[in-house]
Image (cartoon, grey):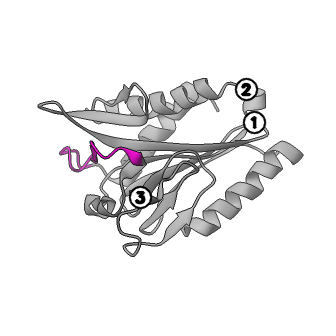
Amino acid sequence: MAYEYAVAEMEARVAQIRGAGAPELVWLLEHPALYTAGASAQKSDLLDAGAFPVHRSGRGGQYTYHGPGQRVVYVMLDLERRGPDLHRFVRNLEQWLIDSLAEFGVAGERRQGRVGVWVSLGGGEEAKIAALGIRVRRWVTFHGVSLNVAPDLSHYRGIIACGVPEHGVTSLEALGVHADMAAVDAVLKEKFQTLFGD
């Protein structure tokens, strides 16, 4: 799905949730290859501006990549109803990804001072497997998370992902887990309901 269309639909849905009581929405999709620049993006972290289209984003965070083989999940929830606690919301998103990865035999972990989910590669090496970038308007969340299932990891070379140059990125496929997107989606849906309810 085109990034611009997704953002426009999210903006509209957020307004409807707050203004008209529309149902919350969790949207699972893939984008064509592109980079997004979050609110904290540093110009120096864009290493190859010509590699893919670059979209400015109102979400938190820095530069990230989206593309085929990556599951992007946009989460539009009403925190006014669920409890206006952004810290808890972010921790729950991370836990959702950690619990989902565990179903595939992958130990996802948090890192102090770094948002997202990481995996240890052995020998002191680690890499990011899932990113978070959210925005909240009048206590309605949007944007969300991305999980690397089987993207072309070379596409990350055009940016310093999430502003962390000392660590790379990985995917389920790179870790030897060959799961199709439908299987990943089924796990994400199950684990989401466990943590967040209907």
Q: In percent of the image, x 49 and y 34: which residue is there?
A: 190
Residue 2, given in percent of the width and then of the height, sits at 55, 70
Whether tag 2 and tag 1 are in contact, CB under 8 A, the answer is yes
Q: In percent of the image, x 43 and y 37: which residue is there?
A: 116
Per the image, the residue denoted by label 2 is 84
The C terminus lies in quadrant: top right
Q: Secondary structure at mark 1?
A: loop
Q: Which residues are magenta?
A: 163-178
Label 3 packing within 10 angstroms: few (<14), some (14-19), many (20+)? few
The one nearer the camera, 192 or 68, is 68
Residue 189, given in percent of the width and then of the height, sits at 50, 39
Which is more N-terminal, label 2 or label 3? Answer: 3
Residue 192 within the segment the image draws in magenta? no
The one nearer the camera, 48 or 83, is 48
Per the image, the residue denoted by label 3 is 44
Q: Is residue 122 above or below residue 57?
A: above
98 to the left or right of 196: left
The one nearer the camera, 169 or 25, is 169
130 to the left or right of 124: right
Per the image, the residue denoted by label 1 is 139
Which is more N-terminal, label 1 or label 2? Answer: 2
Q: Which kind of residue does numbered mark 1 sit on?
A: Trp
